[in-house]
Image (spheres, rainbow, N blue to C red):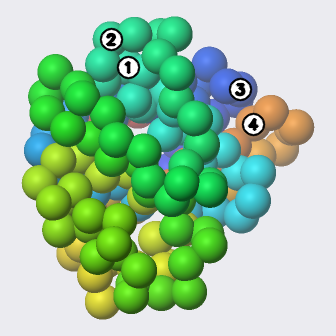
Amino acid sequence: MTLTLPLDDEAATVALAAKLAKRARPGDAILLEGPLGAGKSALARAFLRAACGDPGLEVPSPTFTLVQSYDLPAGPAFHFDLWRLDGPAGLDELGWEEAREGICLIEWPDRLGALRPADALAITLAPGATEFSRVATLTGWDGRLEGLAA
C-alpha cells in the first residue's frame, strides 16, 4: 500500500507521527527517507514522544552517536541515523540484531543494503509548496495504514 499525505506544517507532522506510534509494534522498522532538511528527525522525534506519552521527552539527534535507545511502554525503540556509515558493515557494532526486536526508526536507510527489512514502513519526506510544508509518501505496512489520512 502506498499513501501520500500533505503535511501543511510541523503540527501535521506531529499528528502523523502520533498515529504511526499507535500502530507500531515490536519488530517494526520505519525507514525515514528524503533529502537533508526534509523533516526525518522531526518525524522521529515526534514519534518517540508520542510513543512514550511524554511530549517533553529529550530526543537528541543520533547524528554523531549513530543510535539512541528508548524504553517505551510497548518495549524498546531505537533511533538510527546512518548518514555517516558507508554501508551495513558497521551495524553489528551498533547492536542492529538486538535492536530489530524493538521498534527501529532509521534515517538514511539506503546504508542498510541487504539488511533493509522487507516488511518495513518506508516514509519518504519531500519539501512541500511552502517553507514549513512537506509531502509524506508511506509505503508498506499493508492493512495497517487504513484510516491514517483521516
Q: Which residue lies at the image location 11% right of the left edge and 54% below the top edge?
A: 101
How packed mark 1 is, by other alpha carbons closer than 10 Å (few <14, some 14-19, many 20 or more), is: many
Q: Give x and y (percent) for residue 110.
A: 49, 79
According to the image, label 2 marks what residue? Answer: 53
Q: Give x and y (percent) for residue 56.
A: 51, 10
Q: Secondary structure at mark 3?
A: loop
Residue at the front extreme of this rendering: 93
Q: Give the amino acid type for the residue marked by disc 4 in the picture.
A: Ser
Q: Give the amino acid type for the residue marked by disc 3 in the picture.
A: Asp
**Which of pointers 3 and 2 indicates the residue nearer the eye?**
2
Q: Picture quarter containing residue 126?
A: bottom right
Q: Looking at the image, tell me whether mark 4 or mark 1 is earlier in sequence order.
A: 1
Q: Which residue lies at the image location 71% right of the left edge and 51% below the top edge?
A: 38
Q: Secondary structure at mark 1?
A: helix
According to the image, label 1 marks what residue? Answer: 50
Q: Looking at the image, tell me whether mark 3 or mark 2 is earlier in sequence order.
A: 3
Q: Secondary structure at mark 4?
A: loop
Q: Give x and y (percent) for residue 51.
A: 30, 24
Q: Give the amino acid type for the residue marked by disc 2 in the picture.
A: Gly
Q: Find residue 121 and name its label.
A: none
According to the image, label 3 marks what residue? Answer: 9
According to the image, label 4 marks what residue? Answer: 133
**Which of pointers 2 and 4 indicates the residue nearer the eye?**
2
Q: Looking at the image, tell me whether mark 3 or mark 4 is earlier in sequence order.
A: 3
How packed mark 2 is, by other alpha carbons closer than 10 Å (few <14, some 14-19, many 20 or more), is: some
Q: Looking at the image, tell me whether mark 2 or mark 4 is earlier in sequence order.
A: 2
Q: Give the amino acid type for the residue marked by disc 1 in the picture.
A: Ala
Q: Are marks 1 and 2 in contact (CB under 8 Å)?
A: yes
Q: CA distance from mark 3 to mark 4?
A: 5 Å
**Which of pointers 3 and 1 indicates the residue nearer the eye?**
1
Q: CA distance from mark 1 to mark 2?
A: 5 Å
Q: Secondary structure at mark 2?
A: loop
